[in-house]
Image (cartoon, rainbow, N blue to C red):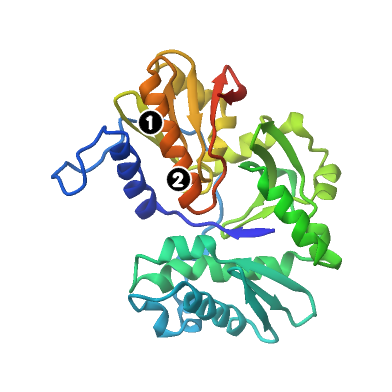
Amino acid sequence: MKFSRQLISFVTIPLISSLLQSCNVLATAGEQQPPLKPLFVIKIDRSKTLEPSAAGNQSLDKFFADEIEQPGLSRDRFDKLLADAIVNSEPGQSLIGIKNHAISVKFADGITADTFTDNAWAFCKDIPGERKSSLRSFLFATKDVRSGLGKNKGTISDIVPLVRSDKLIEETRTLKLNAAGPEAKSLDLAWYPIAPGIVCVYASDSPNSLAMLPAAKAAELGLTANDMKKGPLRTLRSHLPVDVSVYSANGIFMLTCGGDFESSLILDDEIMATIKQRVKGRLVFGVSNKDVLILTGDADKTVVENVRQIVERRAREGSRPVSDKLYYWDNGKISLCP
């Protein structure tokens, strides 16, 4: 399974304001307030960087109809226009259909693959006039899918750990029932439980997409649950922005690192320990969505309950939900916060 990568600061900053506002730590909607700035940043030592992504490749814009930039575009119409762009971007591709916001495409060699539009829609629905440039990485990611299906891709040096909902495992098992050949094998994921509701899955990280690692490939690379904080975590740190921004108000903290890996930061004991030093009591966190990590201390029960309500609502209403639960972090050990 592959998903496109993209920096989404224009999404995460308004989200931070909204979440902190909901916790009654910012001015209410409509009131004047200064621009939101991080309390501090955590410097990341990056030993390597990803190759440039497709985000600046304007030649990809020609595959999108101008209609995609129109205000008021419906979700279903957006899906159709994105599907047309995917099909037109490479000779020999054909559209099988669109169902439940998944675009099914048949490649020239007969292999089929699905592209999910949840992330694309979340990024683009509120930016008419800027959608083509934002969708370049999504379009390019389909080329990664085409080149990767049926091939033995992924090396130990590009594998990262992702924190995702345990529902992902059930969803991929269901998809596997209707798949065949290489696609079916790609849906048998390498995953490991972290705590109730959340799991770690390994993924191969490229400039334009994250490809979930099949169990067979993980076994070939010798990856197990014991490795999620070893080599893959070091690779994750090398793919993070140099600065992980930490926003805070009244004992509530939020971390941002580009939109792909916020939930995965709970596996980084150094980053979590940095926040632990600033809270009272045990460190409590929630990962309602893949791009949301919100933390506090358990000394103030009122704040904990406010955070719980935010996490539950974001998991219910936001894109790419992970968990509606709160968790404790105790020196690297993660457990459910009842």
Residue at the farthest left position: 32
Q: Amino acid at mark 2?
A: Arg
Q: Where 316 sits versus 114, above or below?
A: above
Residue at 41%, 32% (x, y): give it.
Answer: 307
User: Regarding mark 1 in the picture, which secondary structure is present there?
Assistant: helix
Q: Where 52 sits versus 63, above or below?
A: above
Q: Which residue is mark 2?
A: 314
* Real-space Cα separation, disc 2 to disc 1, in angstroms: 12 Å
Residue 96 placement (x, y as % from top left) = 69, 81
The quadrant where residue 229 appears: top right
Q: Is residue 233 visible?
A: yes
User: Regarding mark 2 in the picture, which secondary structure is present there?
Assistant: helix
Residue at 57%, 44% (x, y): give it.
Answer: 322
Q: Which residue is mark 1?
A: 306
Residue 193 placement (x, y as % from top left) = 71, 34
Between 90 and 32, the one lying in front of the other is: 32
The quadrant in which the N terminus is found is bottom right
